[in-house]
Amino acid sequence: MLDKIEKIKKILSQKNINYYYVYLVNSGFGDIITNSSIQSFMCDLFGLNYVSISNKEINLTFSEFYKQFLLDIGYNPLINDKNIHYIELDNILDDLDNIYANLCKLDNSSVNAICIKPKTLFYTCSFDEFAINSNKNIYNNSFISDFKDKYYKSTNIKYMRHNTLNITIHLRLGDCSTILLNNNKDLVTISWFDRGVHSHSWYNLKNKTGFKGVLNKYRYIDDAIKFVQQLHQYKRDILKDIYEDLNITLITDGYSYVEKVVNRKTFIKQLKKMNMKADLCIIDDFCKKNIEKINNCNLINNKIIGDSYKDFLNTVEAVLNSDIIISDSRSFIFRVIMGWKIDINFSQILYLGSAEKTAQYYLNKNNCVYKKFINFSNVFEQLQNLEQDLINKKLKDKILQKELGYNDDIIQENKTLKEKIAILQSKNNVLLNNTSTNLTAQSRIKNQLSYKLGQAIIDNSKSLLGYIKMPFILSYIKETHQKEQKIYQEKIKNNPSLKLPPLETYPDYKEAIKCKNHLSYKLGEALINADKSKFKLGYLWLWFKCKQLTKEHKNCKINDK
């Protein structure tokens, strides 16, 4: 790979080609960021200097305001491209030989720049292995640097952190909406249904038949509002001494695309195949009521509903300010972080519906932690251990303010502080790492091996695939836990002051003891006892023991009611 890049660098030098342009694809903004990054990243490797975009017309039909946004931040259509040599490809990495051959044939002495234009779209998956093996970041390129520079110079983005915990919930509805279709209580996820993927796009509330994932998406708005209520309670009970305020933003494109999709010929054809009918009045009523639910929820501080230019800018600002972001979508939030984020010292946690294989690799470089979004209940369960990470964030901010003598706003804006911040962070790494999961009695118990093993048993006993994966997952958890304990023992050996205090000294000790009655803890304890038994004979009756514990747990729940 690298030898081919060197060959291209040499031929470019021989042809006196020193510059390159980037072509903006006509697609969503996530695709624009990705495709421009791939073009720029490779041309940077070729040793060329970035100039600007090569589009003679900024004709981006995917959204009506994309063109205006790019014009507003300083991108102008190219007037004259006579000095540019265009090379159209499907995949840059696969076509390096073709790029070289194409340049060898070039005999136009007036050409001093190239533009590697995608025939359709470039995809990052082809760069996964190359990026990781060479420790490269395709989003670290000249186009992204220029884009960020133009954006921050032309917009008045405000950082709203201080003592506020900012959480953003992003729900992609639009053409991906799950709607109530008719009086027969048919639910459909319109994008999948329109494509004829009925196995994953339909559920009936009356008969309780179909794909349950559709039912989950149908409840998203209700689940999101319940989640917001839980967050406020969590703030009052647990985070009251860490953050003064809780600021929640809910972002959704709404249901504006629904009627358009439902009236498509392809959609109507699928309805006939399933012997179903769409009642536009019921659909419209369902959509309006869901938006009303959001608007009537006073616990949501900021509501960005729609797909306008203003909504777009407000969305970007909210994402860049958020400590925690929860999104059922795959790529939008990820692309915003890659394309816009400049404050690498600001750590963020992202719960995303799905992401490419290298998402965590790239997000790590932007000080972000990627977690899989399953549903809002799952996110809230994970938040029970999150207060330690939030305490660490506040501790780090206070250290920076005290020792550097700067307030929060200046820290965010002044790039010259990076080296000093890095030094201070390294000084406090031991303290921050040690407190990451052990600042409440409840979190310490949930961090015990028995609890983690039991939780994994529960999570993986819901499907055949889960049962197959379970031995490997349990083995991994045990091995990781042992490594963590070894590191902890070494730390307290070198610095006894880092030893954790007895559980009884924690203010939430009485509440935390209840965790030992959780099914997770008991199942994990049963597994550990089976593993410790003589000749490991305990495994012979482990299955029966787990069934007994589960039955007892269910009976206790019934009695409590």
Image (spheres, rainbow, N blue to C red):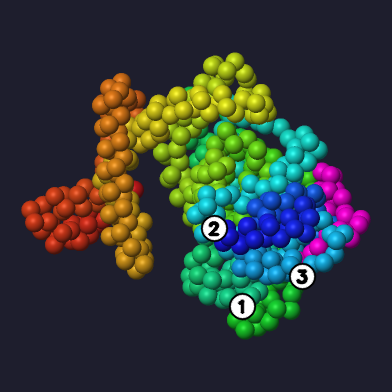
- Would you say 461 lies left or right of 405 here? left
Q: Is residue 80 in the magenta section?
A: yes
Residue 196 is marked as 1
Q: Quadrant of residue 97?
A: bottom right
- Which mark sits nearer the N-terminus, 1 or 3? 3
SS for callout 1: loop
Task: Residue at the far front: name it.
Answer: 14
Say which element carries label 3: helix
What's the residue type where badge 1 is placed?
Gly
Between residues 327 and 141, which one lies in front from this camera angle? 141
Instruction: Decide if residue 485 is on the left or right side of residue 252.
Output: left
Q: CA distance from mark 1 to mark 3?
A: 47 Å
Q: Residue at x 31, y 50 (%)?
A: 477
In the displayed structure, 309 sits above or below 539; it is above
What residue is shown with label 3? 105
Foreground mark, 2 or 3, reads: 3
Residue 117 percent across, percent down from the top left: 75, 63
Q: Amino acid at mark 3?
A: Lys
- Asked if the residue under mark 2 is in contact with the one under mark 1, i.e. CB atoms within 8 Å, the reply is no
Circle 3 Cα neighbour tier, 10 Å, few/some/many (<14 / 14–19 / ≥20): few
The image shows a total of numbered marks equal to: 3
- Circle 2 residue: 130
For discs 1 and 3, the disc positioned in front in the rendered view: 3
First in sequence, mark 1 or 2: give its number: 2
Relative to 404, say whether 437 is above or below: below
